[in-house]
Image: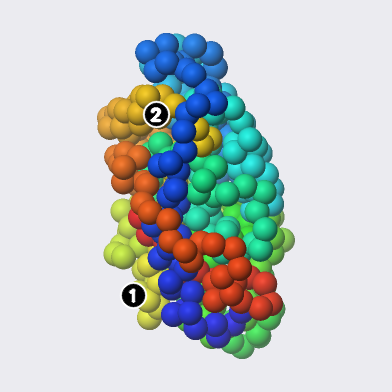
Amino acid sequence: MRGRPVARCARMARALAVGIAAAVLGASGARAQAPADKYPEKPIKIIVPFAPGGSVDILARVIGQKLTEHWRQPTIVETRPGAGTMIGTQAAAKADPDGYTLIIVVSNHATNPAMHATMPYDALKDFEPISLLARAPIVPYASPAFAPTNVKELVAVAKEKPGTVNFGSAGPGSMTHLVAEMFKIQAGIDMNHVVYRGGMPALNDVLAGQIPMTFATVTQALPQYQSGLVRALGVTAAGRYASIPNVPTFREQGFDLVASEWYGLLAPAGTPKPVVAKLNAEMRRIMALPNLGELASRDRALELVDRGAERFHPRRDRSLEPGDQEARPQGGVNVPRPIIW
């Protein structure tokens, strides 16, 4: 993976960036009949394909609370981590398309097709987009016992002892993992990815001293950073980020790496259009609520986005077709350029 030219996978990444929910425009709602004026008539389930306690889980619970308050129907958040989010996502793809099973996905929903020769679902055809919800930049959070205090010092340590620095992430193919791999390529260093089933287990191992650092969304470890339990070595925002203003960007430290994790709400393909529209309108209402940022993430570390399905729904590109050898190089994992919505 080291040294792989970024340009070689840029085309695939662009296709994925515009393809998160493409091709579902043609999906019909024939399998389900749920008039929007009666929706919802029973509890709604939001699947979180990550371990509990992470930024996706927090966001889902805040949205669930607001849905329950407004619609007077319980909203259940179900965490189903594993297989790079594919376990939970497969469950959502197979659910009845009636609007009562939703899922919050992140950037790897778009990159998983490029990283796996086979998938248990079609990331485009099997889902109906509802709304883009939020964004957050990536931060390498390190234990105070780990010598580096910034990205430049991390590179120096990694070059002095190649292959000895371990790091965690939210899982293979996650934006946090891909940012780390892009950083390795740009810096010309070798570090070892330790696989976890979510960002929170990786952070817990940093706190326990099992690994020296993890790449995470800024939200993930913000309380621990503010308490001095971890260091923030840099941030992949374009400029200084409001919740961590003293942390220099990667660009400031000599690395042209700007990327954000994004969070989107999907339903199974075939969910009736009126129900999708009602959910979209409700997401817009929720995202516009005063002080929602404080509920969704401490110190507004999560940037909430007020966008509808029409902005979360571009066209399909042939680069997404199976067997694209340029996008899926020999040796296994490719490294799409991080996606910014």
Query: Residue pushed farthest bottom?
Result: 160
Identify the residue shown where x is 31% and y is 46%: 311
Identify the residue shown where x is 55% and y is 85%: 3
Amino acid beneath label 1: Glu
Q: How is the image coloured?
A: rainbow
Q: Is residue 210 left or right of residue 229?
A: right
Give residue 279's position: percent from left, percent from top. 39, 27
Question: In this figure, which residue is indicated by the disc labeled 1?
Answer: 252
Q: Is residue 57 visible?
A: no
Q: Secondary structure at mark 1?
A: helix
Q: Is residue 111 visible?
A: yes
Question: In this figure, which residue is indicated by the disc labeled 2?
Answer: 273
Q: Quadrant of residue 289?
A: top left
Quick one: label 2 or label 1, which is nearer the N terminus?
1
Q: Is residue 22 left or right of residue 220?
A: left
Pick the front one: 41 or 288: 41
